[in-house]
Structures are given as structure tokens and as C-alpha cells.
């Protein structure tokens, strides 16, 4: 078991795996705060994610993600933190997330992701041609990073948001009880 001391839940996974909708509901259920790295970056920069990618490029955005995780270190507690799909790929971010709390990978199949994100215009990395190939290629390349970063892996296919919130909530509470 990877060790962590802080009372936070960090949700990771590919775009469209449900991090934000599950995270919001889970936070409510646990009486935790909810935060989302993309939303915090948008608030901080005043630009949409698409604009940041367009104007300053992906590397700049990745640096914003790392800076944000560093900023959150001293103060984040009793929070469900939803993260951008590419954030766990940096080794430094992986370590920072694990120091923040329990990292949960919401594992989702390429078919479900493709279905959920069809017609979406807000994810710069999935725009243009070859939509399905992009998802397949990126998911294949990223899966091992997600698995390596996670304390727990939950499969989301064929499960509703409510079911997933119950599964995670039970898992976290059981774990809290064991630690008491
Ligand atoms: C990205 C995922 C997005 C956002 C950006 C890049 C990625 O967040 O951070 O478009 O590289 O997978 P979501 O996972 O919340 O869609």
C-alpha cells in the first residue's frame, strides 16, 4: 500500500471517465469540499483549457498543473480533487498526488469514453480527425501511468454515478475505520 497521511481523495483517469461528476457527488456524500484542477487553472488564468493549449501550448498547461499541485500541498484537506486526464503522466505529479491523499483511478473502456465524448469541443487533444484512434492510442499509452499512480482502481463501465459514489464512499469509510 502506498502511504498517505492527508484526508483527501484524488480522482484520476482518462477524459470522460466521470471524474468531475463522480467527484462532485462523492464530496457531497462525504461532506468534503470538491475541487477540480482544470477548473482551478481556468479560474487562475482567466482562459479556457482550449485557449491555453492554443495560445501557450501543452507544455505550458502541464507546468500549470504541476504548479497547482505544489500550491495545494500545504492546505488541501477533506477534499475530493478531480484531475485533468494528462496530469498523472508526470512522475513529479504522481508523487505530489500520492502525498495529497488516496488516489483512485476511474478505469473506463475506450468504447465508453468515445461514446461519452462524441461531439465534445472542449478537449483540445481529441479534436480533428481520427477521434477513435486518438482515444485508443492515448488510453493505451496512459493506462500504465494511471495504474502506477493509483492506490485503488475502480471500473466505471456499466455503472451509474450513484453506484460509483457508493462503492468509493464505502471503500474510503471502511478504510478510515480500519485506521482508527
Ligand atoms: C487532458 C484532459 C482534460 C484537460 C485537458 C487535457 C488530457 O481534462 O486537462 O484538455 O491530457 O487528458 P479532463 O480529463 O477533465 O477532460
Image (cartoon, rainbow, N blue to C red):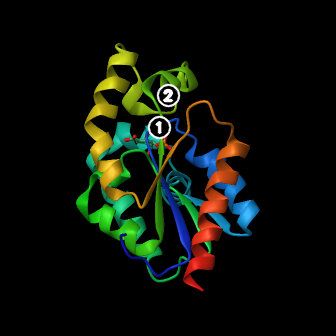
Most foreground residue, 109 or 96? 109
Q: Position of residue 32 (x, y in %)?
A: 68, 69
Residue 95 location, quadrant: bottom left
Position of residue 72 in the picture relative to residue 18 (left or right):
left
Q: Position of residue 108 (x, y in %)?
A: 48, 35
Taking the spot 60% from the left edge, 62% from the top edge, the residue there is 171
Taking the spot 43% from the left edge, 26% from the top edge, the residue there is 110
Above or below — where is 137 with respect to 172? Answer: above
Above or below — where is 166 with respect to 79? Answer: above
Give the quarter the ligand 1 occupies: top left
- Distance, label 2 to label 1, CA atoms, is 7 Å
- Element type at mark 1: loop
Q: Is mark 1 within 8 Å of ligand 1?
A: yes
Closer mark to the observer between disc 2 and disc 1: 2
Along the polypeptide, which appears first: circle 2 or circle 1? Answer: 1
In the rendered image, the residue lying farthest to the bottom is: 180
- Element type at mark 2: helix
Q: Position of residue 39 (x, y in %)?
A: 56, 53
Taking the spot 38% from the left edge, 76% from the top edge, the residue there is 3
In the rendered image, the residue lying farthest to the top is: 129
Most foreground residue, 42 or 139? 139
In the rendered image, the residue lying farthest to the front is: 178
Q: Which quadrant would the C terminus be assigned to in this image?
A: bottom right
Residue annotated with mark 1 = 15
Residue annotated with mark 2 = 113
Label 1, residues with CA under 10 Å away: few <14, some 14-19, many ≥20: many
Q: Which quadrant would the N terminus be assigned to in this image?
A: bottom left
Q: Which mark is residue 154?
A: none
Taking the spot 73% from the left edge, 45% from the top edge, the residue there is 162
Label 2, residues with CA under 10 Å away: few <14, some 14-19, many ≥20: many
Amino acid at each position: 500500500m502506498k502511504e498517505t497521511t492527508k484526508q483527501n481523495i484524488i480522482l484520476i483517469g482518462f477524459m470522460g471517465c466521470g471524474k468531475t461528476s463522480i467527484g462532485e457527488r462523492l464530496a457531497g456524500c462525504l461532506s468534503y469540499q470538491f475541487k477540480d484542477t482544470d477548473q482551478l487553472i481556468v479560474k487562475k488564468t482567466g482562459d479556457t483549457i482550449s485557449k491555453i493549449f492554443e495560445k501557450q501550448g501543452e507544455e505550458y498547461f502541464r507546468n500549470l498543473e504541476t504548479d497547482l499541485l505544489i500550491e495545494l500541498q500545504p492546505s488541501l484537506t477533506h477534499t475530493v480533487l478531480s484531475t485533468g486526464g494528462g496530469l498523472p503522466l508526470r512522475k513529479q505529479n504522481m508523487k505530489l498526488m500520492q502525498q495529497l491523499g488516496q488516489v483512485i483511478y476511474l478505469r473506463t473502456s475506450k468504447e465508453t469514453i468515445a461514446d461519452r465524448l462524441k461531439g465534445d469541443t472542449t478537449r483540445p487533444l481529441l479534436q480533428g480527425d481520427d477521434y477513435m484512434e486518438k482515444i485508443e492510442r492515448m488510453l493505451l499509452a496512459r493506462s500504465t501511468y494511471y495504474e502506477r499512480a493509483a492506490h485503488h482502481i475502480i471500473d466505471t463501465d456499466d455503472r451509474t454515478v450513484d453506484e460509483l459514489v457508493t462503492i468509493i464512499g464505502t471503500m474510503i469509510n471502511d478504510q478510515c475505520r480500519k485506521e482508527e
